[in-house]
Image: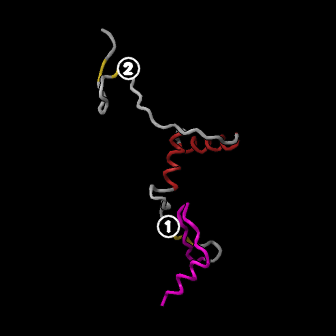
Amino acid sequence: MGERRWTEPGLTRAAYGITVIPVPTLTFKVTPAEAARIRRLARRAGRSVSEFLRRRAAEDRTESGAAAGRYQVKRSSKTGLPVMHAPRGTPRVTAEEVKALLADFP
């Protein structure tokens, strides 16, 4: 009976066997300790190293470059006062920027 032949959606010709659609591959160097940590964190998350790194990269920033995530308000264990925590990747606000904003405040 021969090999099974089928056409995948989006492909222009019939494919034999398993069709692999090429995607970009990233390769980078890490220290042995960094590699062990990445593998350990991926294992803990129940993901492959590739999936773990893809998700971590997507969490950090949105396509626009803005910080992803939500601001959270938590109580300080020392003072009991509310403290706002910004998402990872949010740029720090300097004292000069705060003074400039308050200068226009009525």
Q: According to the image, label 2 marks what residue?
A: 17
**Quadrant location of the N terminus?**
top left
Q: According to the image, label 1 marks what residue?
A: 71
Write the residue at 29% across / 28% down.
Answer: 12
Q: Is residue 11 above or below residue 89?
A: above
Amino acid type indicated by mark 2: Gly
* Highlighted range, magenta: 80-106
Look at the image and say whether residue 94 sits in the magenta stretch: yes
Q: Secondary structure at mark 2?
A: loop
- Quadrant of residue 64 within the rendered picture: bottom left
Look at the image and say whether residue 10 sits in the magenta stretch: no
Within 10 Å of the Cα at label 1, are there few (<14), some (14-19), or many (20+) other Cα atoms? few
Write the residue at 50% across / 45% down.
Answer: 54
Residue 11 in the image, given as x and y percentages of width and height: 31, 30
Q: CA distance from mark 2 to mark 1?
A: 49 Å
User: Could you say which is closer to the camera, residue 11 or residue 31?
Assistant: 11
Between marks 2 and 1 in the image, the one whose residue lies nearer the viewer: 2
Amino acid type indicated by mark 1: Tyr
Residue 80 in the image, given as x and y percentages of width and height: 60, 76
Residue 43 in the image, given as x and y percentages of width and height: 57, 40
Write the residue at 56% across / 66% down.
Answer: 91
On the picture, is 9 further left or further right than 56? left
User: Could you say which is closer to the camera, residue 63 or residue 86?
Assistant: 63
Q: Are marks 2 and 1 in contact (CB under 8 Å)?
A: no
- The colour scheme of the drawn protein is secondary structure
Residue 87 in the image, given as x and y percentages of width and height: 53, 63
The residue most toward the bottom is: 106
